[in-house]
Amino acid sequence: MPVPLQQKNNSDTSSIDIKLLLIGLLIISLWRASIVFGTDISLYIDEAQYWYWSQHLDFGYYSKPPVIALIIAATTALFGDNEAIIRLGSLLFYPLTSGIIYLIGRHLYASRVGLIAAFIFISMPAVSISSTIISTDVPFFFFWSLGLYAFIRALENNNWRWWILLGVAGGLGMQSKYTMGVFVFSAVLYLFLNSQWKTFLNIRLWLAGIIAALIWLPNLIWNAQHQFITFQHTSEISEGTAQIFHWDELLEFFVGQFGVFGLVSFLLLITLSLRVKLPHKKLLLSFTWTFLAIIFMQALSGRANANWAAPAYVAASIMLAAWIVQSHRTKWLAALLSLNLLFGVLIYYSQTIFNVVGIELTSKNDIYKRLRGWPEIGKQFSAIKKDYPDAVLLGTGGRTILAHLLYQARPLQVATWNPIGKIRHHFDLHNNLEDMKDKRFLFVLEGEISTEITSRFSTSRHVGTLETNIYDNYQLKYQVYFLKGFKGYK
């Protein structure tokens, strides 16, 4: 027989659940910390770029708002700038986010619901991966969850502090990732579905919006000063093609959700959304399916990564937990958590597992292949730079080699060859080559340098090759040229 969910939390039960939560989060965090601190995997390109941003704090950057850079700046200022410390923010934020999810589940239903919801969230495959890297999802999940908790409490008692907290969470969420804007659509949908029309007349709701806008304002001003380049970038990566509908992309995104939330979790989410009655279901559905629906439409237009809708699973985790407690479906919980944790084991120990079963790592099955080789490339570049200590790192169209060298061969000054003046990535925003005619450069690129480039310098010569073979059919190889006497693009 189903048990009531809207019940007062027994103090003894809550105390036990809190202890279980803290112990569970500690064990999972220590496990993931052992992976982060115990592997020699270098930063991937976005992580390296975020680190560079953290060395040049600003109110905005080419592709993202500034919170990610602030987090990295804080951890590296305290503990150094090796790869594990750069990723430390993930290990700290995800347990905090899980704690907020516990509070939401406890407040809406019961302490045990909050406990189970927190474990569903912290074990989901997307979080397992994201916990071992540093990305904008790390603070985004936190502020999304905090905003949801504040929204629920504000609607309940209209206390000023909850509306203010909602505004702060919303503003910092926008400073973490622009898709925090989906929170507004989710909240509006819920208020309509629940016929809470009077809430729109509540001045405290609008105050929360003003607080959020004021917190976001510095980034908005930064964008205005840089031709709204971040919004342009976001539009470019989201835009579709001439074909109206991309059913293959939609199917790929849909299937990908089983890998983001978990095989059992996403299957249960679909079933519960359609069939099961739960208290507060409208609230949880609004904060789950609004996000998913928006990204589903984006996928149908031609472009959406599987993890783009991941914050939807904050509310989804709570809904699954409520059903599990109400229906005593402990076997489903065991299956869900077991598969999620198994996914983490397979990802974290893939190389060890391959070695044990006798499978040779190749460029086709190594999920970390794009992270390998960069420390060696950095050492080779540093050796060349010893002969040109004042040289500026010069790159061309792509950001890959620049981001990796800026970290692996730090410290470096950077510039880009950009005769058409198009802003292609963050490194095009600053250090215009036209203002550096008295500088000397080490130009790094794949392949040979063109006469179009050498003709614009008084001196040019090949000074080395950066090369490392990772697999027989996969290597990193770049040419390095010394350039000086820049004459201008024309």
Image (spheres, rainbow, N blue to C red):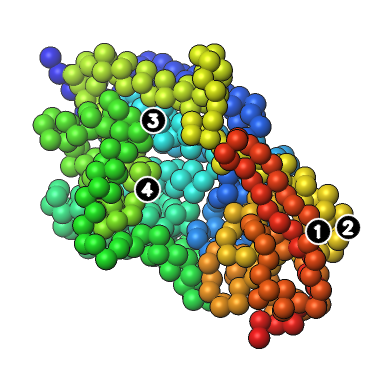
> Is residue 54 shown to the viewer in this render?
no
Question: Which numbered circle lies on residue 384?
Answer: none
Point out residue 417 in the picture as x, y percentages from the top left corner. 64, 70
Q: Tell me how far mark 3 sits from mark 1, CA to CA.
A: 48 Å
Question: Which numbered circle lies on residue 305?
Answer: 4
Along the polypeptide, which appears first: circle 1 or circle 2? 2
Mark 4 or 3, which is nearer the eye? Answer: 4
Looking at the rendered structure, the secondary structure element under dot 4 is loop
Point out residue 449 in the picture as x, y percentages from the top left corner. 68, 66
User: Which amino acid type is shown beneath numbered disc 1?
Assistant: Val
Marks 1 and 2 close (CB-CB < 8 Å): yes
Residue at 53% x, 35% y: name it: 363
User: Which amino acid type is shown beneath numbered disc 4?
Assistant: Asn
Marks 2 and 3 close (CB-CB < 8 Å): no
Marks 4 and 3 close (CB-CB < 8 Å): no
In this rendering, is residue 126 above or below 179?
A: above
In this rendering, is residue 394 above or below 163?
A: below
Residue at 83% x, 49% y: name it: 383
Along the polypeptide, which appears first: circle 3 or circle 1? 3
Residue at 21% x, 50% y: name it: 247
Q: Which residue is mark 1?
A: 463
Q: Which residue is mark 2?
A: 387
In this rendering, is residue 238 above or below 288?
A: below
Along the polypeptide, which appears first: circle 2 or circle 3? 3
| Screen quadrant of the C terminus | bottom right
Drawn side of residue 453 relative to residue 311, left or right:
right
Q: Tell me how far mark 1 sits from mark 4, CA to CA.
A: 40 Å
Mark 4 or 2, which is nearer the eye? Answer: 2
Q: Which residue is mark 3?
A: 124
Q: Tell me how far mark 4 sits from mark 2, CA to CA.
A: 43 Å
In front of the other: 479 or 76 = 479
In front of the other: 400 or 333 = 400
